[in-house]
Image: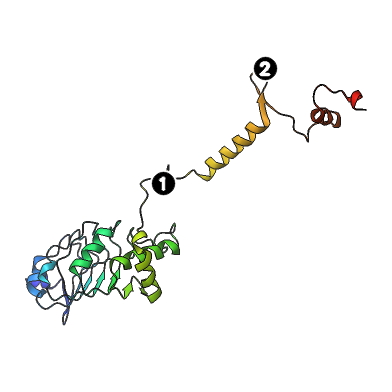
């Protein structure tokens, strides 16, 4: 027990078990500190689940940044939890998680999901922009309307109104494949070029593609004949 406790940083009701590559919450943590811990930091481990967290019945703050927590994440009911940070985990789809949090963390007012694929923040996803991130915020706030802070920003009244009005339609859907979704610029350009070629080219008797004469290419006599028709000669016109 003494060896285990040496891995823990204790400051009053704040417990830190950081950077030990733990794949599970150690049993001794709950047994020793669960009944009085108010803040628990389990960052920089290898956690794939939060089994054992049910021992921390009075928990108010939970920090589990830089772990391996995925879409199947489950928490016990924590009625006093007001702060949860899940930065830099393996979350790709947060809809189920948000509904779960609404059920088991009724006092939650601060949530941070930065560094996850499900959070389209431009700092970690250069292909995303501010509009993508704002849509994500509307969706999260629609699911968790009691939040006061999301990621690094305070929730504004305007955001809350937008989230209530259209947040349900703002779910960020990850495309199944980059290919096949929309024609590329190169493909569109090739198609345009082909259309232009088709309209200005024909085939001769040998089957070879030859360019049609345009009005610009014709001589004055040829243009005149083209306009008057094949049965009228230049002499007749004069």
Name the foreground residue: 10 vs 187: 187
Q: Residues within 10 Å of mark 2 (few under 14, many from 20)?
A: few
**Apparent side of residue 86 relative to residue 207 in the rendered image (left or right):** left
Would you identify the image quadrant in which residue 43 lies?
A: bottom left
Residue pictured at 32% horizontal, 66% vertical: 142
Where is residue 198? Give x, y as percent.
63, 31
Pointer 2 or 1: first along the chain: 1
Residue pictured at 35% horizontal, 64% vertical: 167
* Residue linked to disc 1: 178
Where is residue 86? Give x, y as percent.
27, 66
Would you identify the image quadrant in which residue 194 lies?
A: top right
Name the foreground residue: 136 vs 123: 136
Where is the C terminus found, in terms of image quarters?
top right
Q: Secondary structure at mark 1?
A: loop
Query: Residue lying farthest right?
Result: 238
User: What is the spatial separation of the Cα atoms under label 2 and label 1, in whole angstroms?
Assistant: 44 Å
Query: Residue lying farthest bottom?
Result: 12
**Apparent side of residue 195 relative to residue 151 in the rendered image (left or right):** right
Query: Residue lying farthest top?
Result: 206
Q: Which mark is residue 205?
A: 2
């Amino acid at each position: 027990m003494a060896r285990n406790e040496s891995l823990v940083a204790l400051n009053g009701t704040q417990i830190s078990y950081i950077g030990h590559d733990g794949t599970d919450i150690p049993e001794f943590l709950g047994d020793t500190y669960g009944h009085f811990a108010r803040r628990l930091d389990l960052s920089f481990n290898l956690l794939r689940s939060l089994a054992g967290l049910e021992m921390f019945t009075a928990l108010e703050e939970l920090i589990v940044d830089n772990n391996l927590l995925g879409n199947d994440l489950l928490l016990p009911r924590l009625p006093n939890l007001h702060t949860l940070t899940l930065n830099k985990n393996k979350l790709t789809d947060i809809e189920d998680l948000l509904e779960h949090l609404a059920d088991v963390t009724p006092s939650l007012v601060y949530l941070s999901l930065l560094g996850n694929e499900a959070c389209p923040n431009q700092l970690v996803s250069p292909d995303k922009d501010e509009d993508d991130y704002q849509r994500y915020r509307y969706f999260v706030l629609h699911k968790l309307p009691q939040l006061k802070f999301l990621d690094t920003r305070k929730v504004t009244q305007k955001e809350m109104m937008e989230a209530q009005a259209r947040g349900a339609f703002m779910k960020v859907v990850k495309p199944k494949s980059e290919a096949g979704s929309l024609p590329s610029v190169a493909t569109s350009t090739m198609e345009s070029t082909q259309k232009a070629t088709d309209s200005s080219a024909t085939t001769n008797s040998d089957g070879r593609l030859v360019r049609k004469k345009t009005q610009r290419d014709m001589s004055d006599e040829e243009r005149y004949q083209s306009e008057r028709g094949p049965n009228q000669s230049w002499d007749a016109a004069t």
